[in-house]
Image (cartoon, helix red, strand yellow):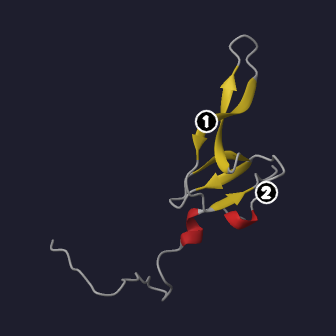
Amino acid sequence: MPLKYLDRPFVARNASGGVGDNWRGRFPEGAQPMATAPERSGTPVWVMTANGQGSWALHHNGAWQKLQPYKDFKSGAVSWRMCGEHISQPVAWSLPRKK
């Protein structure tokens, strides 16, 4: 399959006439842009990247830090802590739903 080079940007259009694919379909209902994320409250939130994958994160030292569960082998209690991994370029966030 040959590659085709254009002198202008290409914008994919779906059948309904919209631009690109349905990017909101990758995120859960109620997801909000990162500009509205609570950075100072210390509240863990579900943070999603552009491909739709998400993880629990906390804003710390100017970046979103991934949270992971750690299990105490003696008592079996689970605590959530930062694992040292930064989430690069998060695009959306949401709070967990109450069941």
Q: Residue furthest top?
A: 74
Q: In the rendering, which numbered label is found on residue 76?
A: none
* Mark 2 burial class by Cα count in 10 Å: few <14, some 14-19, many 20+: some
Residue in front for this viewpoint, 87 or 16: 87
Q: Is residue 16 above or below residue 1?
A: below
| Element on which disc 1 rests | strand
Q: Position of residue 58 (x, y in %)?
A: 72, 46
Mark toward the start of the polypeptide (1 vs 2)? 2
Residue 68 in percent (x, y) is at: 65, 35
Q: Amino acid at mark 2?
A: Pro
How many labels were placed on the picture?
A: 2
| Residue 75 higher or lower than 63, as above or below | above
Residue labelled with disc 1: 84
Amino acid, disc 1: Gly
Nearest to the observer: residue 18 or residue 59:
59
The residue sitting at the front extreme is 61
Q: Position of residue 44 (x, y in %)?
A: 76, 46
Q: Quadrant of residue 33?
A: bottom right
User: At 76% across and 21% down in the image, what residue appears?
Assistant: 77
Disc 1 + disc 2, Cβ < 8 Å: no
> Seen from this angle, which residue lies furthest left?
2
Q: Quadrant of the N terminus?
A: bottom left
Inter-mark Cα distance, 1 to 2: 20 Å
Q: Please name the residue shown 50% across and 59% down the image.
A: 51
Residue at 68%, 13% in the rendered image: 73
Percent position of residue 7, x then y? 28, 87
The residue that label 2 is drawn on is: 38
Q: Secondary structure at mark 2?
A: loop
Question: Residue shown at 56%/58% (left/top)?
Answer: 89
Q: Is residue 33 visible?
A: no
